[in-house]
Image: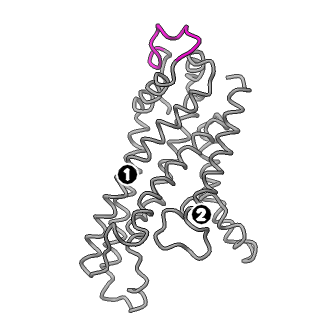
Amino acid sequence: MSTPMTADATFPARRTHTTRLSFPNVVRSEWEKLWSLRSTRWSVLAAVVSMIGLGIIIAAVQMGRWPHMSLAERHDIKPIDMALGGVNLAQLAIGVLGVLVMSGEYTTGMVRSTMMAVPRRLPVLWAKIAVFGAVTFTLMLLASLVAFFGSEAIFDSHNVGVGLGAPHALRALVGNALFLTVLGAICVGIGGLTRSSAGGISVFVGVMFVIPGISELLPESIGNAIHPYLPSNAGQAVGQAVPDAHMLAPWVGFGVFVAYAVAIIGVTAYLLRRRDV
């Protein structure tokens, strides 16, 4: 979100003096701002390619090893989870873009024009979350479907593929899209909290990637107690067809992840009203 934009590019001149702007118009403005930036296109492309490409690559590599696998290894293949393995990389692109959606306006100074046009401020936050959430869910669900069918075609070569009717397959597909959508909302909130692109991205990476790694270094009793409740682990539970024994149940974990989102966005909304721009 580093490309400077003027107030005229955000809101038509005839509206900049109004004290109230309808929410649909705010949503329309945020949609235009989102897609006017090259960072959006590159980040979305990276997320889609990661989701599709990595899942298919994992399937191809696993099936290439098939003649050398033991019976135990063949039995342990999880075709649905392998097909959706790209979510681990896609979340990086979605998370970074989510931070930039909010923090970019502070970096360029465009936030002053935005808040002048929408003095109540909070509709701007809701519109950003709604627009980015809709884009994320739609594209990630489509990418998950492509990855699933592409990977299953490869798994079918050794009769280990499954269809959408397989247990938990549809839940995992939709769950991955939901996880990335809520992750994007959390990162929009983080961008608003930090008001800094570098700071927001650092917080996102630390929470979603660094802290889970550190938890692995803790004594087993402590690590097992906190590991399921970390944001990344709780959120990804809903996207796993074969749940990890040490993770929360899929929808319970997703509920915990949504609670994190509500808390972060709630604090962001409060500070947005209280802070000077």
Q: Say whether residue 132 is left or right of residue 266.
A: left
Q: Earlier in the sequence, mark 2 or mark 1?
A: 1
Q: Say whether residue 245 is left or right of residue 76.
A: right
Going by the numbered disc 2, the residue's amino acid type is: Asn
- Per the rendered image, the range of residues in magenta is 8-21
Structural crowding at the residue carrying mark 1, measured as other residues with C-alpha within 10 Å and reported as few (<14), some (14–19) or many (≥20): many
Q: Say whether residue 16 is left or right of residue 195.
A: left
Q: Residue drawn 41% across and 60% down?
A: 173
Element class at badge 2: helix
Residue 276's quadrant in the figure?
top right
Expressed as whole percent of the image width and height from the top left, the position of residue 130 reads 50, 37
Going by the numbered disc 1, the residue's amino acid type is: Val
Expressed as whole percent of the image width and height from the top left, the position of residue 29 reads 45, 24
Foreground of the two, 18 or 42: 18
Residue at mark 2 = 233
With respect to residue 132, does 62 lie above or below?
Answer: below
Element class at badge 1: helix
Q: Residue drawn 48% across and 42% down?
A: 133
Expressed as whole percent of the image width and height from the top left, the position of residue 243 reads 53, 72
Residue at mark 1 = 48
Q: Residue drawn 31% across and 68% down?
A: 151
| Contact (Cβ within 8 Å) of mark 2 with mark 1 | no
Residue 58's quadrant in the figure?
bottom left
